[in-house]
Image (cartoon, rainbow, N blue to C red):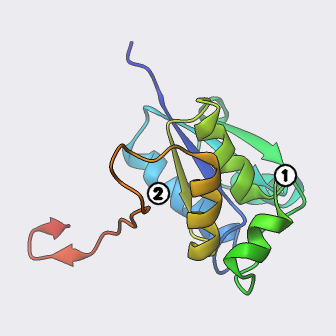
Amino acid sequence: MTKLITIAVDAMGGDDSPKKVIEGINLHYKKNKNIFYKIFGNKNVIEKIISEKSINKENYELIHTDEKIENEDTALAAAKRGKKTSMWLAIESVKNKSSDIVVSAGNTGALFVIAKLNLKMIEKIDKPALAGLWPNKTGMN
C-alpha cells in the first residue's frame, strides 16, 4: 500500500470559509483517494459542513482552533496574532513533518511571512514563491 499524502488545510482562510474550503477538499477527494487531510479551523463549524460531503472520515482529521488570520491583517499583524491561528498551525504541521504540504486560500502576505518564520528555505533561495494554476487549451498550467 502506498503512503497517503497528508495535506494541511487552513480551513478558515479565504472568502466564504470554511464552506468553500471544505467544498474544495470534497472536489479534490473525489479524484484523489490517496490523500489524508489535516483540516485546521473551527471544528464546530467545519463538522456541520463536512458531514454533508462524501469525504471518508478515515481520510481527514479536524484540528480545532478559534483563532484565524483576517484578510485585512497586515503580514506583520498576522504573524503577531499568531501561533494558535488555523494558518500558523497548518504551516507548523509541515515544519513538524506531520503534513507533507500546506494549502491556504487566506491572506497571502501572512502566509508568506508565517511560512518563512516556520519553514526552511531551499539552499540559495531567499524568497518564497507563489504557485497558481490557470487554464490553457489542453487543461491547466
* 49 horizontally vs 6: left or right: right
Question: The C terminus appears in which quarter of the rendering?
Answer: bottom left
* 18 horizontally vs 67: left or right: left
Residue 22 seen in the figure: yes
* Label at residue 43: 1
* Picture layout, residue 55 above or below residue 25: above
Observer-side mark, 1 or 2, equals 1
* Picture layout, residue 102 above or below residue 68: above
Residue in the foreground of this view, choosing between 49 and 89: 89
Residue 51 seen in the figure: no
Residue in the foreground of this view, choosing between 119 and 50: 119
Residue drawn where x is 75% and y is 65% of the image: 79
Q: Say which amino acid is labelled 2.
A: Leu
Q: Quadrant of residue 75?
A: bottom right
Q: Say which amino acid is labelled 1.
A: Lys
Q: Which residue is mark 2?
A: 27
Residue drawn where x is 65% and y is 59% of the image: 114
- Place of residue 31 in the rendered image (x, y in percent of width and height, measured from the top left): 37, 46
Outermost residue to the top: 1
- Place of residue 37 in the rendered image (x, y in percent of width and height, measured from the top left): 59, 41
- Place of residue 9 in the rendered image (x, y in percent of width and height, measured from the top left): 61, 52
- Place of residue 14 in the rendered image (x, y in percent of width and height, measured from the top left): 63, 75
* 20 horizontally vs 125: left or right: right
User: Earlier along the polypeptide chain: callout 1 or callout 2?
Assistant: 2
